[in-house]
């Protein structure tokens, strides 16, 4: 088999000693995801097994873990906290059929795999992989090694980011920090909690630039039409803007805007929900509503500084963005249920939504954080007032109607908000707004709220179906019945009667969640 051409130029590093090898092992380990294959190349004694051992011990959080060389067993498997890792040494393989007999191909599926001597079985190697070539570097010292990282296929861009992240940490003074991967969201961003030797703690956001995707309409991609953030500039701009208003967004401690690396304040992990399954904590939700009252009491700009030389402009939540989101129901959710509507029915759907959204688009514009719900709210009991609510994940913010974020909070896709609590909190918000502005129209606000709640529920059903069908993430399906209930709750508003009739005719209820 001809070798797969790399997608990037090889990156050469010099490791001066064992400590430098451990840092590279940490960098590689933090970059790994289930399904990744890393090949370790080099002569006998170059240090392939040493690097593999350091990676495994790092992932196991155990510097004393026994990691024998699999030279004689060929394969050694480790059940690690983040994934299963398979360590293979093919030095003794003389016939690739030996690997078939051992079932090595099956071990590759879904696991992280480290392969020493990959040249012994070239047909086993996937197109997307990282090769780490190690050689002695006697001119740099007895322990020194030269390492060449080459990303093949889809691993190319990720390989390029590994040394860039190391340089960022060194420049920010966090090169020696202990690193711990923490659960992220459904996006391509990755997060780590860093603990400095002096005890300080920050979060690392590793956010590669979002690929624009194929054009789907008017020569523009879905992310462009829906106004999704492409880089970290919006996050930096909004974090600073929210903090200027006295809200608890993370402070930015260091930033590499070009490469998408941020060190931000760690707001902790105390949720605004309690129990299992989680229920809203009323005190926390009332405070979260008060945050929105405060935010919407300001006249907010559409342009915010990122650096002294860079400005971020919040896009408008326009009709194209609203419609491309609700069309996810047609493109993903309904096909999943084998309920694809006819073209005339689709046209009626969009026509009804255009009519329903007309009053929404006429609303005054404010900052819409867009994902203002329990996973992105942190409870900070040591702070006072509205500062008790920590805000994260607002990089997709747009200029739009105030009711959107309230609907996002009170019809939380992942947490069941009882209808009586929802109504109480809508009333709390409306009374507070009217106290400041006697012209605040409660009836009109209720219509806008219901419309946006229905729009958001429609979008989420499509997104969760897409996460399952396209991205292999079925865990989101368990939330669909809840979202469908919210949708019916919103469609009960009289102004949405035409839409309610359409959904009743064409949208089946979601199937029961799989065990």
Image: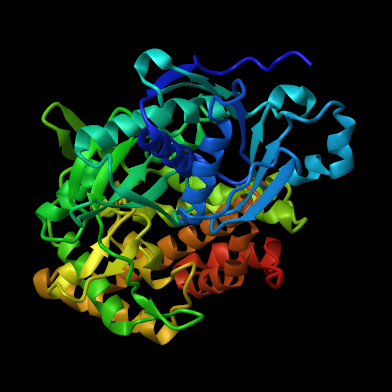
| Front-most of residues 268 and 447 | 268
Q: Based on the displayed image, in which of its 4 quarters is residue 250 positioned?
A: bottom left
Relative placement, left or right, of 492 versus 87 is left
- The residue at 35%/56% (across/down) is 359
* Image location (x, y in percent) of residue 360: 35, 55
* Image location (x, y in percent) of residue 125: 72, 28
* Image location (x, y in percent) of residue 157: 49, 26
- The residue at 61%/68% (across/down) is 478
Quadrant assignment for the C terminus: bottom right
Res. 214 visible in picture: no
Instruction: Give above or below for 121 relative to 84.
Output: above
Residue found at the far front of this picture: 142
Relative placement, left or right, of 181 versus 425 is right
| Front-most of residues 156 and 485 | 156
Residue found at the far bottom of this picture: 420
* Image location (x, y in percent) of residue 98: 87, 35
Instruction: Give above or below for 372 relative to 39.
Output: below
* Way the structure is coloured: rainbow
Res. 57 visible in picture: yes
Instruction: Give above or below for 345 relative to 320.
Output: below
Quadrant assignment for the N terminus: top right
- The residue at 23%/53% (across/down) is 364
Q: Based on the displayed image, in which of its 4 quarters is residue 163 positioned?
A: top left
Relative placement, left or right, of 445 versus 10 is left
Instruction: Give above or below for 19 relative to 139.
Output: below
């Amino acid at each position: 088999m001809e070798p797969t051409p790399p997608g990037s130029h090889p990156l050469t590093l010099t490791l001066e000693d064992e400590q430098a090898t451990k840092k590279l092992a940490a960098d590689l380990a933090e970059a790994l995801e289930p399904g990744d294959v890393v090949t370790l190349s080099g002569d006998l004694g170059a240090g392939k097994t040493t690097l593999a051992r350091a990676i495994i011990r790092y992932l196991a959080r155990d510097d004393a873990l026994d990691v024998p060389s699999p030279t004689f067993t060929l394969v050694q498997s480790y059940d690690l906290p983040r994934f299963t890792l398979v360590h293979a040494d093919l030095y003794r393989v003389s016939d690739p059929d030996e690997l078939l007999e051992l079932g090595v191909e099956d071990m590759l599926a879904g696991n992280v795999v480290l392969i020493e001597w990959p040249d012994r079985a070239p047909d086993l190697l996937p197109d997307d992989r990282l090769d780490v070539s190690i050689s002695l570097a006697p001119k740099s010292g007895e322990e020194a090694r030269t390492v060449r990282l080459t990303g093949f296929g889809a691993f190319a861009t990720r390989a390029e980011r590994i040394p860039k992240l190391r340089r960022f940490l060194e420049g920010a003074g966090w090169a020696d920090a202990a690193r711990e991967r923490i659960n992220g969201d459904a996006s391509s961003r990755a997060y780590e909690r860093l603990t400095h030797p002096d005890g300080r703690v920050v979060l690392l956001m590793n956010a590669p630039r979002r690929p624009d995707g194929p054009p789907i309409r008017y020569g523009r991609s879905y992310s462009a039409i829906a106004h999704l953030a492409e880089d970290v500039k919006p996050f930096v701009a909004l974090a600073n803007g929210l903090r200027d208003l006295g809200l608890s967004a993370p402070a930015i401690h260091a930033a590499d805007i070009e490469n998408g690396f941020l060190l931000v304040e760690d707001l902790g992990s105390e949720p605004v929900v309690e129990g299992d399954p989680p229920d809203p904590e009323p005190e926390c939700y009332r405070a979260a509503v008060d945050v929105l009252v405060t935010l919407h009491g300001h006249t907010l700009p559409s342009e915010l500084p990122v650096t002294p030389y860079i400005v971020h402009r919040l896009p408008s939540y326009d009709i194209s963005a609203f419609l491309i989101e609700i069309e996810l129901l047609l493109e993903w959710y309904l096909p999943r249920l084998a309920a694809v509507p006819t073209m005339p029915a689709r046209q009626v759907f969009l026509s009804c939504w255009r009519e329903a959204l007309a009053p929404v688009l006429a609303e005054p514009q404010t900052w819409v954080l867009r994902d203002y719900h329990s996973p992105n709210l942190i409870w900070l009991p040591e702070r006072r007032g509205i500062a008790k609510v920590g805000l994260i994940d607002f990089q997709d913010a747009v200029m739009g109607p105030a009711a959107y974020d309230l609907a996002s909070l009170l019809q939380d896709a992942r947490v069941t908000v009882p209808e009586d609590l929802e109504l109480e909190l809508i009333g709390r918000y409306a009374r507070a707004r009217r106290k400041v502005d006697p012209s605040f129209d409660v009836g009109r606000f209720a219509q806008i709220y219901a419309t946006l709640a229905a729009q958001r529920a429609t979008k989420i059903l499509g997104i969760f179906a897409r996460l399952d069908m396209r991205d292999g993430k079925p865990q989101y399906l368990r939330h669909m019945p809840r979202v469908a209930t919210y949708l019916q709750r919103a469609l009960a508003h009289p102004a949405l009667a035409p839409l309610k009739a359409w959904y009743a005719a064409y949208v089946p209820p979601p199937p029961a969640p799989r065990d």
